[in-house]
């Protein structure tokens, strides 16, 4: 018992010594106050900010380089637009096939069961499905979304090909061609976003925007 008490006391004493050494060792606490005034610290901060701005300006590429990089990223944007177009096209086709199947099922069950029992429950389910699909198609408009996305992707790809081949309207100097290309593609993307916003609005709101 005495040995355990002595061991614990020795451990606590050694830990206390190390704690004091760490507290008063300047190498451990590098963030210790150096005695600078607030105005000096503020000046150091302003100088550091100025150095950061100058370094950022030095590393910023020229407009021509940024436009060339934008042109290299354009094929990825075209692929993204086409993937979204295929997605909405598949959604639209699935909705149309469900409408065809449900409509045909209602006609077949009505002709098969006369009076409608016991097919009345199936008729109600099919009619409900048709109503839901018709409402979802009119609200989300997957066909229109697919068409707009595909049209934008084709137009951008056409301009990419024209820029690579050096045909109209890209018959100027390289810097002017890149600037014209970036401006044209950005305008197309803005128009695409506007069309998406119009599709998200109610029908009455679309008429007012148009």
Image: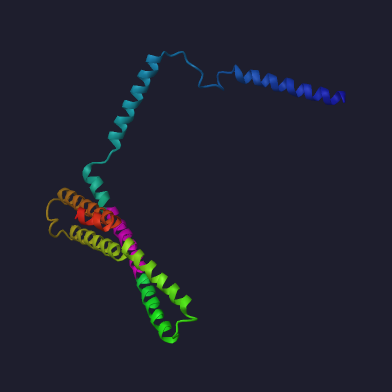
State the residue in front, 165 or 204: 204
Q: Is the residue 129 above or below the residue 42 in the image?
A: below
Quarter of the picture holding the C terminus: bottom left
Measuring from the top left, give residue 34's x and y in whole percent: 47, 15
Does 84 appear in magenta?
Answer: yes
Does 36 appear in magenta?
Answer: no
Q: Is residue 149 visible?
A: yes
State the residue in front, 150 or 131: 131
Q: Residue furthest front?
A: 115
Residue placed at 13% from the left, 50% from the top? 173
Q: Is residue 20 left or right of residue 2?
A: left
Residue placed at 29% from the left, 53% from the top? 73
Q: Residue furthest right?
A: 1
Measuring from the top left, give residue 176's x and y in whole percent: 15, 49
Where, by quadrant of the figure, is residue 158 drawn?
bottom left
State the residue in front, 150 or 68: 150
Measuring from the top left, give residue 104's x and y in whole percent: 38, 80
The magenta stretch is 72-92
Quarter of the picture holding the N terminus: top right
Q: Is residue 156 left or right of residue 106?
A: left
Prevailing secondary structure of the magenta residues? helix
Q: Is the residue 192 above or below the residue 9 in the image?
A: below
Q: Is the residue 179 above or below the residue 42 in the image?
A: below
Measuring from the top left, give residue 8's x and y in whole percent: 78, 24
Where, by quadrant of the figure, is residue 165 drawn?
bottom left
Q: Is residue 85 visible?
A: no
């Amino acid at each position: 018992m005495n040995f355990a008490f002595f061991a614990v006391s020795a451990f606590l004493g050694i830990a206390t010594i190390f704690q004091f050494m760490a507290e008063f060792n300047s190498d451990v606490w590098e963030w210790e106050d150096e005695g600078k005034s607030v105005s000096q610290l503020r000046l150091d901060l302003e100088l550091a900010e100025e150095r950061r701005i100058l370094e950022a300006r030095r590393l910023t590429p020229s407009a021509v380089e940024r436009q060339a990089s934008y042109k290299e990223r354009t094929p990825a944007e075209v692929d993204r637009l086409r993937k979204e177009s295929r997605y909405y096209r598949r959604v639209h086709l699935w909705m149309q096939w469900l409408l065809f199947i449900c409509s045909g099922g209602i006609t077949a069950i009505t002709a098969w069961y006369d009076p409608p029992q016991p097919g009345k429950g199936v008729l109600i389910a099919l009619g409900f499905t048709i109503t839901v699909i018709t409402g979802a198609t009119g609200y989300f408009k997957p066909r229109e979304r697919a068409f707009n996305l595909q049209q934008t992707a084709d137009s951008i790809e056409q301009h990419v090909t024209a820029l690579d081949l050096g045909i109209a309207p890209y018959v100027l100097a390289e810097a002017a061609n890149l600037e014209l290309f970036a401006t044209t593609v950005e305008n197309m993307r803005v128009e695409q976003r506007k069309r998406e916003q119009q599709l998200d609005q109610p029908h009455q709101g679309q008429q007012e925007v148009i």
